Amino acid sequence: MIDRTHELPIRRQCQILEIGRSSYYYQAVPVKQADVDLMRLIDEIHLKYPFYGSRKVRSELKARGIKVGRGHVRTLMRKMGIEALYQKPRLSDPHPGHKIYPYLLRNMEITRADQVWVADICYLPMAKGFCYLVAVMDWASRRVLAWRLSNTLDPSFCMEALEEALKNYGAPEIFNTDQGGQFTSEAFTGILSSRGIKISMDGKGRWMDNVFIERLWKNVKYEEVYLKGYGTIAEARRELEIYFEFYNRTRPHQGLDDRTPDGVYWSSRNSSQIAA
C-alpha cells in the first residue's frame, strides 16, 4: 500500500501503516531450497499433529529418513510461527503498544450471515520459497469474503482484504481475530471502528476460537496447495482464485448439511433482509 508517487513522504506512509522503514526497504534473502523443502514437510506434520513440538517433529522427520538437528527444526518452526499445542502457525505476536480487545463470542449462538466475520493468516509453502495468505470469512456460512497473498507480514495485505470485504458485502456486527500485530494495529482496528463494527480478539493460544477458518487452511493446503507446488506468487494467486471460487460455490460442507458456503450465506442474508 506504500505509494512512491503520493505527496506524503515514504516515512509518513510507513508511520500510518505502522511499518518500519527498514522493513519497507529490506530486500529479502532467498531461503535455501533445502530449508524450503524441510519447512514444507514440517508444515505437513504440524497440520497432522498440532501438538508436536520440535523434538517430536524431528523424530517424525527421522522416521521419514531425514536427518536434521533439533535446533534447526526449532529455528524453522519459529520462522514459520509454529508452536506445539497450537493448531495454526503463529505468524505474528501481539505488539506491546497495541490495544487488545476483549473476546465477545463466548457462549454466543452464531446463526446468520454477517453476524460475525473472522480473519486469519497462514503460511503457504511453494516450490521455491513461501508466502502468506490472509482470508476474511463469514462465520455462519464459512464463505470466504476476501483474501490476499503477501511475501511479508506487514499489515497492509490484511487491510486490503478487509477493505475489499467491506466494499463488497457491507459491515458485520462483530469482527474476530487473534492478537497478532497485523490485526491489533491502529490502522486495521481503525477501519473496523470507523464502520461501527465491534472488535473481538481471541485469548492467547485459544486456537479453537477460530476453528472454522483453521479448517479452511487445512482444506486449502490438502486440496490445493500441496497438490500443485506453486512456482511463483502470481501462479499461487491465479490458482487460489479458482480454488476459492470452487470452495464458495461448488464444494459441499458436511457442517452445513452438505450445502455450499454461497448457498448458506445468501439464503441467510436474504432471510435477514426480509425479517428486517
Image (cartoon, rainbow, N blue to C red):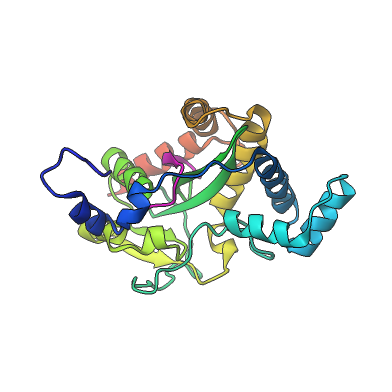
- The image position of residue 253, as x and y in percent, is 61, 39
Q: Quadrant of the N terminus?
A: top left
Q: Specify whether 270 is left or right of 111.
A: left
Classify residue 81 by image quadrant. bottom right
- The image position of residue 194, as x and y in percent, is 20, 58
The magenta stretch is: 142-154
40 part of magenta stretch: no
- The image position of residue 181, as x and y in percent, is 41, 62
Classify residue 186 by image quadrant. bottom left
- State the count of labels: 0
- The image position of residue 20, as x and y in percent, is 32, 58
Q: Is residue 255 visible?
A: no
Classify residue 180 by image quadrant. bottom left
The residue located at (20%, 40%) in the rendering is 4
Q: Nearer the viewer, residue 23 or 275?
A: 23
Q: Nearer the viewer, residue 96 or 169?
A: 96
Q: Nearer the viewer, residue 124 or 13?
A: 13
146 part of magenta stretch: yes
The residue located at (47%, 28%) in the rendering is 241
Q: Is residue 16 visible?
A: yes
Q: Nearer the viewer, residue 63 or 72?
A: 72
Q: Looking at the image, is 83 positioned above or below residue 112?
A: below
Q: Specify whether 276 is left or right of 9.
A: right
The residue located at (71%, 57%) in the rendering is 72
